[in-house]
């Protein structure tokens, strides 16, 4: 079942929590979201607190 943004393609260049969260919401609404990260990946992956070497924030989003 498509959402309100079905057929829309979004290029996400955002960083940290608010930007990627916005991309996730757009995806939930049906948009195709292409996330571009810097080499080494999203900074949120390394933000404390860490559980088993992975950021809790990254796991949630």
Image: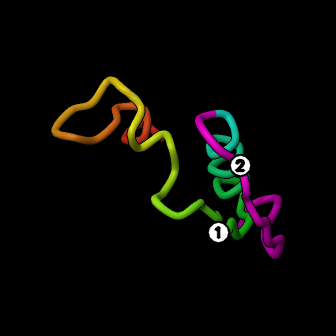
Q: Which residue is mark 1?
A: 1
The residue at which mark 2 appears reads as 14
Main secondary structure type of the part rendered in magenta = loop
- Residue lying at 59% horizontally and 35% vertically, measured from the top left: 17
Q: Position of residue 20 (x, y in %)?
A: 63, 46
**Who's the residue at 32% across and 23% down the image?**
49
The mark found on residue 61 in the picture is none
- Is 61 on the left-hand or right-hand side of 24? left
- Do the residues under discs 1 and 2 have CB atoms within 8 angstroms? no
Give the quarter of the image for residue 4.
bottom right
Q: Nearer the viewer, residue 18 or 42?
A: 42
Considering only vertical position in the picture, is 56 above or below 13?
above
**In this view, which residue lies farthest toward the front?**
39
Q: Residues within 10 Å of mark 1 (few under 14, many from 20)?
A: few
Q: How far from the left and from the top, in percent, is residue 28? A: 64, 53
Q: Nearer the viewer, mark 1 or mark 2?
A: 2
Magenta range:
1-17
Relative vertical location of residue 32 with respect to residue 18 in this rendering, above or below: below
Seen from the viewer's position, the closer of residues 4 and 46 is 46
């Amino acid at each position: 079942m498509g959402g309100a943004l079905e057929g829309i393609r979004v290029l996400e260049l955002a960083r940290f929590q608010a930007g990627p969260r916005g991309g996730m919401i757009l995806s939930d609404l049906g948009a195709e979201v292409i996330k571009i990260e810097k080499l080494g990946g999203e900074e949120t992956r390394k933000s404390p607190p860490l559980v088993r070497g992975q950021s809790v924030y990254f796991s949630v989003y």
